[in-house]
Image (cartoon, rainbow, N blue to C red):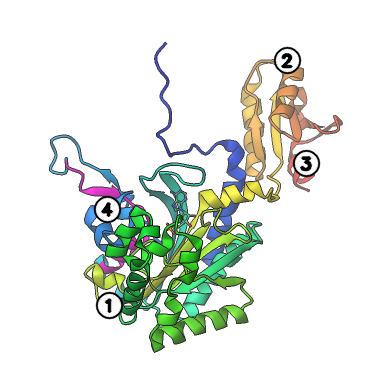
Amino acid sequence: MTSKITAPRGTRDLLPEDAPAWELAEAVARDLSRRYAFERIEIPLFERVELFARGLGESSDAVEKEMFRVSGAAGSEEERAEWALRPEPTAGIVRAFIEHGMHVRPGPLRVTMIGPMFRYDRPQAGRYRQFSQWDVEVIGDPGPAVDAELIELAHRFYATVGLTDAVAHVNSIGDAKCRPGYRQALIDYFGQHLDRLTEDSRRRLEVNPLRVLDDKQLVPELADGAPKSADHLCDECRAHFRAVLDILDALKVRYVVDHRLVRGLDYYTRTTFEFVIAGREGQQQALGGGGRYDGLAELLGGRPTPGIGFGIGLDRTVLAMEEQDVTLPPGAPLVAVVGTGDDQPDRLAVAGRLREAGLRVRPDGSGRKLGKQLEAAAKAGAGWAVIVGDELGDGMVGLKDLATGEQETVALDEVPPRISG
Ligand code: AMP
């Protein structure tokens, strides 16, 4: 026997049984995007490696360790891997903003997308090489109101999909003015405790000391005693952070200030946030996160433009919905169309009429006995069977309630109101 081909490591197939939770999460994301006045944007799945190296920072995990590189066809100019599958969408969206001269539009630009991201990470539960994100970005708004608006939006998303205990962790990591002082404070502090840092952290301390706080294996006492970015903010950044928190209070959004929340990507400035399930901090990876990136457009060759956005991990959201047994809205009733003998054309014609009326219809195309067809319909989850027979000539069909077994003869036109009503 030839060997079986399996899915690549770290990828998942979305199977029909998982679809309702995904569909709910995506529908809520789309509906909220519309109600919060975000417009759709799409960018390529792959971009130049350099975009991510510049945008996310050479020292970020996403660039340093997790870049999923792609190359062109053998013999082509791009045979060497010059592109990478996008690890996140912000760099690509800001690239598009600059490339299309979108700064001349009446701003701020509010855009959204849902799609797959790729990180060549070690796969584990909740961590995949291909995963899906709902992303929103606001480009051209310095905040602070929009910072709170996005945190409130993410919060509303989780509550609407049934994750009422998702809580926002927020922090401010300052800007180009005050971050250098904070970096130095971290270097001084962790420099005295080098022997208690992991090798990874010792390296991070040299290239990007904020990221030491990101190290999941950081000794808790060491983390607790570390300098807090909120204590090192310049006046402008402190006022900005205070304003964000005040608005969140006014909007009654549940949040905690988390001094360790520095986020993995270099481009963040000021506000950073992540969502986790309350009481499961530390054990569980974040459900989503985001932050402000006021320096990114300039880094990518555009004019200085403030920006802020978030990416919500849909895989982890759906996993959490399943773990918490979130009740999903019932699907539309399923109707089977069955018949006797060689009446498949009639069955398909009847199915067509019912579909025109908006019903969800699954015709049985087999020549099996009627009893077998009804059995199969019930197994497939149909609540109703429409039975096509000789009376179709008079516009009549059999309508069987598969739950009770009751059956009657009704006009075909009567079926949709009977089932939907
Ligand atoms: P990040 O930009 O790393 O903060 O990612 C934003 C969100 O995407 C995270 O909070 C996760 O929910 C999700 N995410 C990030 N990486 C992965 C991954 N490897 N597998 C599944 N979800 C992920």
User: In the rendered view, would you say 40 is above or below 352?
Assistant: below
Q: Residue 352, percent across and down?
A: 62, 36
Bounds of the magenta segment:
80-98
- Nearer the N terminus, badge 3 or badge 2? 2
Cα gap from disc 2 to disc 4, whole angstroms: 56 Å
Q: Residue 358, percent across and down?
A: 65, 45
Label 4 SS: strand
Cα gap from disc 3 to disc 4, whole angstroms: 55 Å
* Residue carrying label 2: 369
Label 3 SS: helix
In the shown orientation, is residue 93 left or right of residue 249?
A: left
* Residue carrying label 3: 414
* Residue carrying label 4: 47
Label 2 SS: loop
Q: Residue 79, percent across and down?
A: 16, 40
Residue 420 tag number = none
Label 1 SS: loop
